[in-house]
Amino acid sequence: MRLYSERYQKILNISVTLMKLCGCNIFVKNFHLNILTFLTLLLIVVYFILFIYTIYVGIQNDWGIVLRVITMSTTASQGLIKFQNILCNRKTLRKLAEELKEIYLEYERRNSSKYLKYLHNSIALITRINYTILAFCLLALSTVVVLPFIYYFIKNEKLLIGQVLIPGLDHNIGWGFRIHFAAQAMMLTIGSYGNFAADSLCFLLLAHTCLFKDLLYCKFQDLNETLLRYPRNSFKSKPILQDILKWHQRHVSFIETVKSTYFWVILVQVSTAIIGTVSTLVCQFLGIYPNAVGYLIYCAVLFYIYCGMGNLYERANEEVINTIYDSLWYYLTINEQKLILFMLHKSQTVEGLTIGNLIPLSLNTALNLTKSMYTLSMMLLQFMD
């Protein structure tokens, strides 16, 4: 049977392999910017230059072109901030990944089924998240690419994948259309690949707050068992309590680190998802961008997954507080009870993930923002009409 540390390393290796092709394999020793790094950055810059050019040449005849460009540019913006975040925080990300590997190595050696159970649950959660993101990325990508073929064979109508025009080529005729179609398909595929590579690492790290919480629960179970056998025996309970306190501080430090590391990623991801969803909905209502439904799928799914991750942090902190409350703290000595009180106070002041330190990242926030997106879409639709 494969050890849990090996399973974790296998999942991490997938993210590493994906990022290697983007030129940001930050997990190699003495990582330096290379030709692939600059090529990826150049592609992103070219994307935005073409977006600006497309608006410049088309806005005089069609205001709707702005919405169509915004729809596609939101994913490029997400890719840019994720790319920048990985390069700028590579030491922190590498340290977090190594710390998690050490946790798996340490606790899989313990001859206790309860610890192994939560190691298994952690690996299963990460696997489900990655498969979910991959499935919806492929669905969105295939929708955007396949719909133009359907339109061509059924309606004999030439439909571009995205609203990105190449200077010097007429997209309305023969080879000009084919080159545009191929270039846009390539751009979209590369963008989807890069975003998935960054998201796979992001969620691999963020989702581990559950493992910290579950292992803390196991440690409190060990403490409770000891207290039942040796109540108010500091000699027996103090080593376990000190280990719990250190683990809790480690968990709090982990939350603060990932929160600061992914601050801008979360802010840009959520804000661009909102903008992309609104622009896509309006395009669908106006019938000016039929295959944009793929972007709608991608923006909406990633929006809710990110908000769901914030909800995971809220629930994890609530469960930590409940675990502390439910412990047999009254069997501890007075000095030890003060340590429990300190831990409880610290848990009650821990802040989860936020959107720009303005509102909490949670499913409740997602619901409220969804209502706002619909309202904004209707207002924009009336303006366009």
Image (cartoon, grey):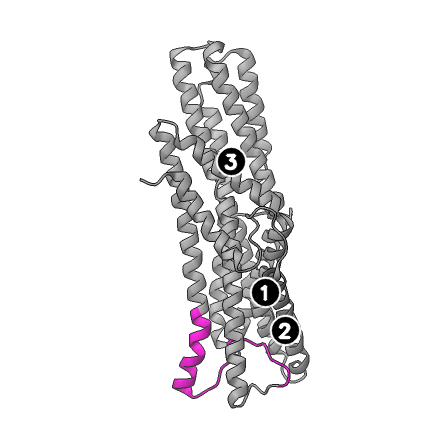
Q: Position of residue 25 (x, y in %)?
A: 55, 53
The span from disc 3 to disc 2 (Cα, nearest Å) is 43 Å
Q: Residue 253, position in %: x, y?
A: 59, 34
Where's the N terminus, which quadrant?
Answer: top left
Q: Residue at x 52, y 42 (%)?
A: 97
Q: Amino acid at mark 1?
A: Ala
Can you tell which mark lies on residue 38? none
**Mark 3 crowd level (few <14, some 14–19, many ≥20, 10 Å Cα):** many
On whether residue 298 falls in the magenta region, the answer is no
Would residue 68 appear left or right of 322 to someone viewing this image?
right
Residue 342's place in the image compared with 69, above or below, is: above
Which badge, 1 or 3, comes first in the chain's sequence? Answer: 1
Q: Is residue 270 left or right of residue 152?
A: right
- Mark number for residue 76? 1
Residue identified by numbered label 2: 51
Mark 1 or mark 2: which comes first in sequence? 2
